[in-house]
Image (tube, grey):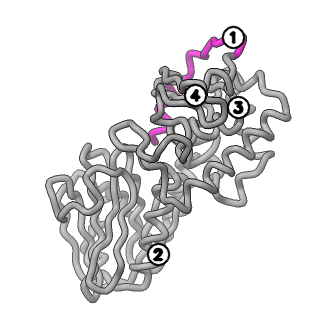
Amino acid sequence: MPELPEVEAARRGIAEQLLGRTCTGYELYRPRLIVAPTGLTLALLVGQPLREVGRKGKYLWLTFPTLTLLVHLKLTGQLVARGSNIPGFAAGHPIPRYDAPLPHKSTALRLDFAPDEHLYLTDVRHFARVQLMLPDELPTTLASLSLGPDTRSDEFTLESLRRGLGRRRGTSLKAALLDQRVVAGLGNIYVDESLWFAQLHPARLVGTLDDGEVVRLYQAIREVLAIAVPQGGAKILHGRAVPPVGEFPYVHGRAGQPCPRCGTSIVKRTIAGRGTYYCPVCQPEPTSTRVATSEGSAASAAAS
């Protein structure tokens, strides 16, 4: 799933290459992509300049004078820009290949910009959604999502993490961090990486953490994203980490490979309904591996 670093790469690419350009047309290949009230259509974009590109958590928005598009790439969404006057970029899910000819059978939407630039949204699983709204409706819509603090914003503080975890004391760390109401933007990959950095087992119950461990976790999340965001995200293909052993990502997608910290083989097991990677030595098993029954809802919240 495209998580905060991948969506942030898309935001930066659009802001650097398309901001201020006028939309000259569009092609909607998959109408189910669009969620809109009666009267709002993509036709309102034509002739309008792109005024703002923003992000919170895994949500991305493009605001024009007449319309805002709130984009969620869900499991396999991808954004690609190409044109004769821009370098182009690709971000999000790595399948199909970033250099694949466009449009193709997975292309859901193309937005055209003057003079000859195009933004494509592709999605091999067809879960991505683009919600249309009037620009002044965006703040209310974002508030209705009940997202926690964005982990790359000033809102994400040690105290905000303490508060968020305090509401999930009976669940595992993996489930709590996947919950977008606790922190916005983390998903399966970056939760695994953060817990490895913090040397905390993903099945550990939140309520068993002491204050020093919460501090360690907060610092780990910030450190992981400081690595991932400049790279445009972790290189994971077909569930396997692409970079050599010892390079980021350090544990996710590396079952059976040596832990970069201690050399022990990385383990994969299902925790909070998700395939979870960790080092059994650096992240020691808690004395109780009991997982609360509410974890299924947390896993669902992670995909929202």
Residue for badge 2: 15
- The question of residue 297 being in magenta is answered with yes
**Residue where numbered disc 3 is placed:** 199
- Above or below, comparing residue 252 to residue 272 in the picture: below
User: Of callouts 4 and 2, which one flags the residue occurring earlier in the amino acid sequence?
Assistant: 2
In the image, the segment drawn in magenta is 286-304
Q: Where is mark 1, residue-wise?
A: 288
- Classify residue 279 by image quadrant: top right
Q: Nearer the viewer, mark 3 or mark 1?
A: 3
Residue visible at 83% across and 28% down? Answer: 210
Marks 3 and 1 close (CB-CB < 8 Å): no
Q: In the rendered image of this protein, does residue 122 appear above or below residue 182? A: below
Dot 4 falls on a residue whose secondary structure is strand
Q: Amino acid at mark 3?
A: Gln
Residue under the point 60% across and 25% down: 264
Residue marked by disc 4: 278
Name the residue nearer the viewer: 123 or 141. 123
Helix, strand or loop status at disc 2:
helix
Q: Disc 3 or 1, which lies upstream in sequence?
A: 3
Please determine whether, in this image, residue 261 is positioned above or below residue 108.
above
Residue 63 on image: x %, y %: 44, 73
Q: CA distance from mark 4 to mark 1?
A: 17 Å
User: Callout 1, which amino acid?
Assistant: Ser
Say whether residue 267 is left or right of residue 28: right
Real-space Cα distance between discs 3 and 4?
A: 9 Å
Q: Is residue 98 visible?
A: yes
Give the mark nearer the N terminus: 3 vs 4.
3
